[in-house]
Image (cartoon, grey):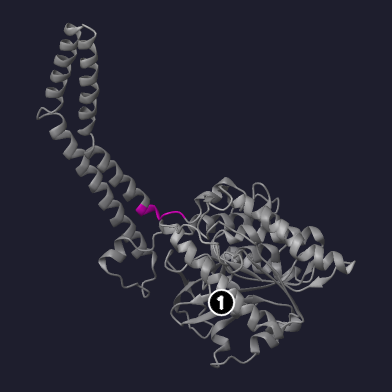
Amino acid sequence: MLSGSGTAGAYHAGVLRALHEAGVRVDLVAGRGICAAGAMFAAVDGGQRLWEKDGIWKSSATARAYGWRRPLRFTGAALVAAAAFLCVPLVPVAFGVVAGIVGILLTMAGLKDASGALTSAFARWLDWLFSPDVLPTIIPRLVFVCVLVAVATLAAGVAADYLRQPARRRVRRGAAGWFVGAPLTADSLLDRCATELWNLIRGAAPVAAPARRELGRKYVELLNENLGQPGFRELLVVVHDMDARRDFVFALLADSERARFFARPAPDGGRQAEAFDLAAIGRDHAFDALAASLRVPLATDPQLVTLSAEGPWRGETHRLCDRPGSVARVLEEVAAAGVEQAIIVSAAPPAGRPHELSSGRGDLRGRTGEMLAAHETAVLRDAVGACQGRFAAIYLIRPSHNPLGPLDFAGVYDERSDRQHGVGELVDRGYEDAYRQFIEPVVAASGERIQVQS
């Protein structure tokens, strides 16, 4: 069971590599958040796309994941340019200070004529620069153009967001909400996952990538046709529906467990409304589940998903996203799928102890990441404690220290180790922790390859 947001996917990639190399037979992979991507790749024997040097988590393109939304980037650049133009008149002042110092030095050296010539030349240049036809005219025009570009970019972003929404699923926002919206976007990481999934599905065939929904269908076909073969595993992904205020479970299970899993009763009697069989009515929503899992609450906009007209939601369009607190729900569904032994993988370090305080983060990414990491640590502790009686064995793999926040894709400086940490290093850390915490004490100690359900 893979749980985490943002950079946690890199840690899970390292753990999956270690399990793959150790020959641990995994029957089911489940995930929430960014780890749903890792679960989907691992389910079709595609984990190499996660941890290879040019894979998703060690590629240089990973540093741009969860970047600022394009309208905000362009608007910010235009406003910075406007501020720079407003500061241009300060440049002659700086030159004036330098010219004055040089003039004094020349006078002290006995070169009064040179000092006077320099002062006169600078005065003439200053008069020309601040004449009505130069800076007083050019600077306001340049600033106006930059502000106009900023406003036009925001307006274009608003129009694009509005037109992208289904006709009957408009989102009511205030003026600030329309022009600013969620600050970050998961589109670049989603595009990378889609590209790697298609490369995995098409193999060596030079076939153009299909539309996202068709890509999800082909993924389901590949997994369903090969389920039970070496390297192919059952899949379970949990996301949250903001409109229904309930979790959605997307799963593709073996025939022996499928009917019982989807027919089991729910506390509110709405099992059919929240459990989607990817081998049946949910076959069109495999990629929707992945896209929704990458949507971090508040930091990104939710994923708009038009549900099947054949299902209980009758073609409605719902807003889906990740729910960091859904670890317990994932474990509940994993147990319902017949799992007896579970490996839980989390990039969140253990709860803090005295004398471990460090400076807080003031930037938006850092503050959001700190909240997510703290929340996931507490939720994981509660979930593992609540599910102890449901499994014959639970194995937990997690780092003892992880300075990377969920949104620190470009790396971060760590005070405790006094150096920079990157996402690629987190992959290696997961690999080492998997050997130290599970493979060596459990697999190697048994003297044989064991079968576990993750």
Q: Quadrant of residue 278?
A: bottom right
Q: Is residue 136 above or below residue 174?
A: above
Q: Quarter of the image for the N terminus: give it.
A: bottom right
Residue 68: say if magenta: yes
Q: Is residue 240 left or right of residue 94?
A: right
* Most distant residue in the front direction: 355
| Residue 404 % position (x, y) | 55, 56
Residue 403: say if magenta: no
User: Please, what secondary structure does the residue beneath circle 1 have?
Assistant: loop
Q: Residue under circle 1?
A: 326
Q: Is residue 264 above or below residue 71?
A: below
Q: Amino acid at mark 1?
A: Ser
Q: Residue at x 59, y 58 (%)?
A: 402
Q: Is residue 93 left or right of residue 212?
A: left
Q: Is residue 356 above or below residue 204?
A: below
| Residue 64 % position (x, y) | 50, 50
Q: Quadrant of residue 283?
A: bottom right
Q: Nearer the viewer, residue 232 or 335?
A: 335
Q: Residues within 10 Å of mark 1 (few under 14, many from 20)?
A: many
Highlighted range, magenta: 67-72
Q: Residue at x 74, y 81 (%)?
A: 255
Q: Is residue 5 left or right of residue 203?
A: left
